[in-house]
């Protein structure tokens, strides 16, 4: 009887230790997920601020040059007027419009401008309405992560091979489908389904964040790479 009692006691303590270990692992995982989401939220807010600041700066510069052109016209300074007129016409209009959703449109426009600055061909097919069935912040985080990864990979690719293609649209009333393709040179480092960062030691944050956002919404994400072409597909659920 004593042996049986000791056996049950040992089983009882083992069960308690197992439950404690499971609880600790769950808490650690939740803490890591919360930290990751917090980092992504800060990144999203910084990106929005940068987009708005650049938009306002372009607007202000164009307005100032128009005012100077008017002043030069009043003073009959033809050379100054011609110079300012040419300067205004040379200011690129980066108010690119891709879809009706302002947040997604701003994110894609930001990375499209960066790609154009680096002379990277950037193809966009964006069909997203003003009101989305999925979380708008999550959608923008997925777009920014995938496009930033694609841009960084393109900068490490031979100029003649550079290419980024983005497709995003709604399927039915509850799903958002996103696909980003880009060429790459070099080797993709992956271990047990986890992509390793090419900029530092450890896991890559971008793909990991995209996977976490997709799974949290009830969706899924897949990544394939072959023959110098990297393709990420994400399904977000509303």
Image (tube, rainbow, N blue to C red):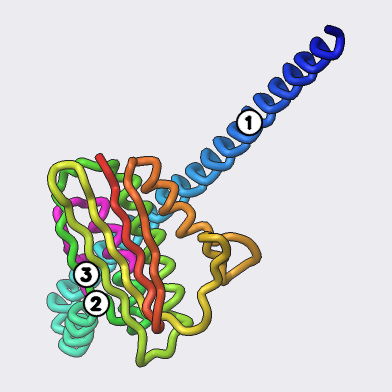
Q: Tell me if residue 39 can be seen.
A: yes
Q: Nearer the viewer, residue 104 or 1?
A: 1
Q: Tell me if residue 48 can be seen.
A: no
In x, y percent, where is residue 162? 36, 84
What are the residue bounds of the magenta stretch? 92-111
Mark toward the start of the polypeptide (2 vs 3): 2
Q: Nearer the viewer, residue 223 or 12?
A: 12
Is residue 110 part of the magenta span, yes or no?
yes
What residue sits right under mark 1 in the picture? 22
Q: Quadrant of the N terminus?
A: top right
In x, y percent, where is residue 169? 18, 56
Please report the residue visible at 40 percent of the width from the left and 78 percent of the height from the top: 226
Q: Quadrant of the C terminus?
A: top left
Is residue 190 part of the magenta span, yes or no?
no
Mark toward the start of the polypeptide (2 vs 1): 1
Q: Nearer the viewer, residue 90 or 215?
A: 215
What's the CA distance linking mark 3 and mark 1?
45 Å
Q: Is residue 184 above or below residue 29?
A: below
Q: Nearer the viewer, residue 64 or 59?
A: 59
Label 3 residue SS: strand
Q: Is residue 30 above or below residue 61?
A: above
- Mark 3 surroundings: few (<14), some (14-19) or many (≥20) residues within 10 A: some
Please report the residue visible at 16 percent of the width from the left and 51 percent of the height from the top: 171
Label 1 residue SS: helix
- Mark 2 surroundings: few (<14), some (14-19) or many (≥20) residues within 10 A: few
What residue sits right under mark 2 in the picture? 91
Q: Is 103 displayed left or right of 141 in the figure?
A: left
Of badges 3 and 1, nearer the viewer stands 1
What mark, if any, has residue 124 been given in the picture? 3
């Amino acid at each position: 009887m004593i042996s049986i009692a000791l056996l049950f006691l040992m089983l009882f303590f083992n069960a308690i230790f197992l439950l404690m270990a499971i609880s600790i692992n769950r808490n650690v995982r939740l803490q890591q997920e919360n930290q990751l989401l917090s980092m992504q939220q800060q990144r999203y807010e910084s990106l929005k601020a940068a987009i708005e600041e650049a938009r306002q700066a372009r607007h202000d510069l164009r307005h100032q040059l128009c005012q100077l052109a008017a002043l030069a016209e009043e003073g009959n300074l033809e050379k100054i007027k011609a110079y300012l007129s040419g300067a205004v016409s040379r200011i690129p209009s980066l108010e690119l419009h891709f879809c009706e959703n302002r947040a997604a449109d701003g994110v894609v426009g930001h990375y499209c401008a960066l790609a154009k600055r680096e002379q990277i061909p950037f193809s966009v097919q964006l069909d997203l309405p003003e009101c989305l069935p999925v979380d708008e912040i999550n959608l923008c985080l997925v777009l920014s992560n995938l496009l930033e990864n694609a841009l960084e990979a393109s900068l490490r690719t031979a100029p003649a091979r550079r290419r980024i293609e983005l497709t995003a649209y709604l399927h039915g009333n509850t799903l958002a489908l996103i696909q980003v393709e880009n060429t790459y040179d070099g080797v993709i480092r992956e271990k047990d389904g986890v992509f390793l960062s090419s900029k530092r030691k450890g896991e890559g944050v971008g793909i990991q964040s995209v996977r976490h956002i997709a799974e949290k919404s009830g969706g899924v994400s897949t990544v394939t790479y072959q023959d110098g072409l990297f393709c990420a597909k994400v399904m977000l659920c509303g």
